[in-house]
Image (cartoon, rainbow, N blue to C red):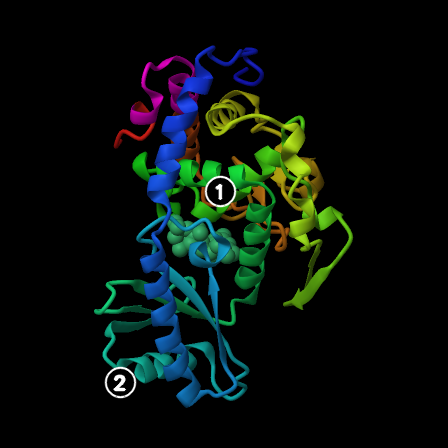
Amino acid sequence: ARMYRRQIICRSDIDSLNAPFLAIFESLIPPEEEKAKQKQLITLLERLVSKEWPEARLYLYGSCGNSFGVSKSDIDVCLAIEETDMDKSEILLKLADVLQSDNLQNVQALTRARVPIVKLKDPVTGISCDICINNVLAVVNTKLLRDYAQIDARLRQLAFIIKHWAKSRGVNQTYQGTLSSYAYVLMCIHFFQHRRPAILPCLQEMETTYSVTVDDIECAYFDQVEKLRDFGCYNKENIAQLVWGFFNYWAYCHDYANAVISVRTGSIISKRDKDWTRRIGNDRHLICIEDPFETRHDLGRVVDKYSIKVLREEFERAADIMQNDPNPCVKLFEPY
Ligand code: CTP
Ligand code: MG
C-alpha cells in the first residue's frame, strides 16, 4: 500500500539548494595531503611485505580505491599472495609479525573475524588500515565503482552526500542490520542508470574491454570510461534534484516486495527470478541489492524485520525533509 503512494512534484525552490549541497560535498573530499599520507603508508607496507614475500602484491580496495572515500577514512588493503603451504590464519599471523617489526602501532591479526584481517594504525599519520588476504573480488568491484565515478561527476557528489547522511543517521552499520557504504554506492549507481534520461550506462552490458576470472566468477565489462564522458549530458538535473529524487525513489517508488536492483543488468529484476522470495537461513531479502559480480549475494541480506522499518522510515524522513523543510542541508544530517 505504501508503493506508488503519491506522485510528488519537486519543490519549486529546489535549485536554490544546489550550492549548499555542493558545499557539503566539497567539505567531505579528502585534501591532497591526506592522500599523500595514505600513499606513504602503502609504500611502507609494500616495503615490509616484499621483504618476506617478494612475489606478493598489495592492492587498495574500498573507499580509498573506489574514489568514494570521504576525508579521514580508514584504508582497506588486500594482500595478493600465492602461498600454498600456509593457510589464511597462518599468513595473517606472519603478516602481523612482519609489520610489527617496524614502528607501526597496534598491529593485530583478527583471524576469527568473518573476514579475517590484520588491523593496524600508523602513529605518524594516524591512519588506520585493514589488510585482508586474496580478496580479489573486492579489488575488482572497487575498480568497477571507480570507473562508474569517472563517467559523471554527479555520482561522486550524490554518493558522498548519501554516505554522509547514512553515517549521521546511524543507518550505515551492517552489524546493526543496516547497509554498508558499498551497498549505498550501488544504490546510487542503480538510481542513475534508472533515471530518465539516464545518467549512467550499464558497463557490464556493453562490449567487454576488461575481463578477469576470480573464484570461477567472470568479471567482464566496458572499462574505457573516458569515452563515455558525455553519456549523462541529456540529463540536466543538479545535485539537489538528485538527492531529492534518490530519497523519493527509496521512500515511495521502490517495490520492496518484488524488486531486486541490479547494477549488473542496469535494471530491476524480480525476486522470483533470483529465488529470493523466501527466507533461507538468515537471508531475508527485505531490500534486495544484487552484487554486480557475486550475483548470489544480496547486499541487503543483513537487513532484518526491525532494521527494514528503521531504514524505510529514514528514507521517508529524508524525502519529507527534501520536499518540505526550509533548511534541508542541516536537517537531513542531524544526528539521530
Ligand atoms: N565489499 C564487498 N562486499 C560487501 C561489502 C564490501 O565486496 N558486502 C568490499 C567492496 O570492495 C567495498 C569494500 O569491501 O568497496 C569496503 O566496503 P565498505 O566498508 O562498505 O565501503 P567503503 O567504500 O570502504 O566505505 P567507508 O568509507 O564507509 O569505509
Ligand atoms: Mg572502508
Mark 2 CB in 8 Å range of ligand 2? no
- Residue 268: % across, % down: 67, 34
Residue drawn at (35%, 43%) of the image? 28
Q: Mark 1 or mark 2, which is nearer the start of the sequence?
A: 2
The tag on residue 101 is: 2
Q: Main secondary structure of the magenta part?
A: helix
The answer to whether any part of residue 212 appears in the image is yes
Residue appearing at x 46%, y 12% in the figure? 11
Please say whether residue 85 is one of the residues in the magenta stretch: no
Q: Which mark is residue 2?
A: none
Q: Which mark is residue 156?
A: 1
Name the element at disc 2: loop
Identify the residue at image location x=34%, y=54%. 73
Quarter of the picture holding the C terminus = top left
Query: Is the residue 176 above or below the residue 169 in the image?
Result: below
The magenta region covers 316-330
Marks 2 and 1: which is nearer the front?
1
What is the secondary structure assignment of the residue under circle 1? helix
Q: Residue at x 52, y 86 (%)?
A: 55
Q: CA distance from mark 2 to mark 1?
A: 38 Å
| Side of 102 where 317 appears, left or right | right
Q: Amino acid at mark 1?
A: Arg
Residue 300 appears in view: no
Q: Answer above or below: position of 284 versus 243.
A: below
Query: Which image quadrant for residue 92?
Result: bottom left
Where is 159 relative to 37, above or below?
Answer: above
